[in-house]
Image (tube, rainbow, N blue to C red):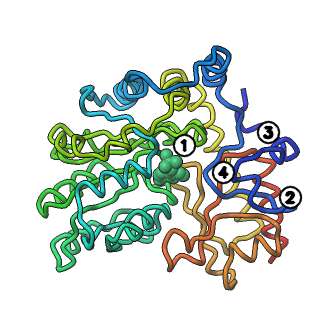
Amino acid sequence: MTVFNLGVAELRTRQSMKWQTYPADVLPLWVAEMDVKTHPAVKAAVFAELEAGDTGYPAGRRYADAYRAFAARHWGLELADAQVKQSGDVMNSMLGVLQTVTSPGDAVVLNPPVYPPFYTIVERYQRKVVPANLTPDGRLDLAAIAEILAGPAHPRAFLLCSPHNPTGTVHTHQELAELVRLCAANDVALIVDEIHSPITHAGTGFTPILSVPGSERAIAVMSAGKAWNLASFKGGLVIGGTAAGDVLDRLPALLLQSMGHMAAIAHSTAMNEGDAWLAEYLGEVAANKQLLGRLLSEHVPAANYLPGPGTYFAWVDCSALGLDSPATHFRQAGKVAFNDGTAFGKEFGQWIRVNLATSPEIITEAIRRLANSL
Ligand SMILES: Cc1ncc(COP(=O)(O)O)c(C=O)c1O
């Protein structure tokens, strides 16, 4: 079985964002959509609902139950039913938690470069971003974080991306334990986006935040949307530490009513029956990362790529190429679309994010176009 086996002609018929945003002569390796067919069990489950006309409101706890089973099976994390709330998606969940635990004007710590909506949910809702950039090798800068949390900005919340998008950094247990300690010592709410956690290569040791001692007040947000390419079925989860029940109780009521019935069917089926598929495509992602490294060192040796194990993205430093805006240049002169690093933090304009959840042929063609544009 090969998961990333779809050709460009077939993919170009897609109606979603990745393949529709740019003209047909631009090869898209940007937004977090995977070039895959729907998992067979998910497809069957959704079809069965459609066949029966069963397209009403969601009932019950199937998504929360599927996640609790997934977390126990993969990470030995045992969660009580009351710790898991079902919601409409991950970013609205993070926003809902943030609004619950902070007030307008409060400072919120992020770790640039970071997934662009992290900025949106802080800045558009009258909070202030306080950056604690990752170190050049992609780790949490715990010394800088310690200073910021105890300093005059007096942050009230910390938004962690774990694993980290775009670098794929898998934070270690030790790093997370120190972060938990610092947040508790400074009375800072820790909110952790774990949507990339299933997309973590075996043996790289993803640590769920709620397995870290002292994390009883932390909140995780999660979904099957990324790992099984189900973004069009809007669903998400808010998972509270054992002492965060008061926060869960105060979440916006409409957030907790925003999951669709079909999303619950699709996401829970993926979590219940999608382990083998996940393992298969993670092997293909690992091979794609090696392929990208090889292609770059052969054709664009000045580009600097340090693979991270917790994502299907590659984060590539193009600063040695001497371009004003590498992403714009590659799109205009090379007809290949990557994410522009600027969206992840204004100082990252020399970086691109490459989506490797696609076939080796498409990656090879993308790097051919990139190299030809130089
Ligand atoms: C870190 C991270 N969080 C959240 C999301 C989006 O999740 P949702 O569509 O459920 O809001 C993405 C999508 O790429 C992501 O990478």
> Which residue lies under the disc numbered 1?
226
Q: Residue 24 — which label?
A: 2
Q: From this view, report whether residue 63 is shown above or below residue 369.
A: above
Give the total of numbered labels: 4
> Which residue lies under the disc numbered 4?
356
Please state if 147 lies on the left or on the right of 19 as rendered.
left
**Percent of width and height locating residue 303:** 65, 71
Q: From this view, report whether residue 344 is shown above or below residue 12.
A: below
Give how far apart the Cα atoms at labels 4 and 1 are.
13 Å
* First reached walking from the N terminus: tag 4 or tag 2: 2
Give how far apart the Cα atoms at labels 4 and 2 are.
19 Å
> Which residue lies under the disc numbered 3?
6
Secondary structure under tag 4 reads loop
Please state if 187 lies on the left or on the right of 204 as rendered.
left
Which amino acid type corresponds to the residue marked 3 in the rendered image?
Leu
Q: From this view, report whether residue 322 is shown above or below residue 234.
A: below
* First reached walking from the N terminus: tag 4 or tag 1: 1
Give how far apart the Cα atoms at labels 3 and 4 are.
13 Å
Q: Is residue 310 visible?
A: no
* First reached walking from the N terminus: tag 2 or tag 3: 3
Which amino acid type corresponds to the residue marked 2 in the rendered image?
Ala
In which quadrant will I find the N terminus? top right
Q: Residues within 10 Å of mark 4 (few under 14, many from 20)?
A: many
Which amino acid type corresponds to the residue marked 1 in the rendered image?
Lys
Which amino acid type corresponds to the residue marked 4 in the rendered image?
Leu
* First reached walking from the N terminus: tag 3 or tag 4: 3
**Percent of width and height locating residue 41:** 62, 20
Q: Residue at x 25, y 54 (%)?
A: 100
Q: Is residue 233 visible?
A: yes
Residue 330 sits in quarter: bottom right
Dot 2 beta carbon under 8 Å from ligand 1: no
Q: Residue at x 20, y 74 (%)?
A: 147
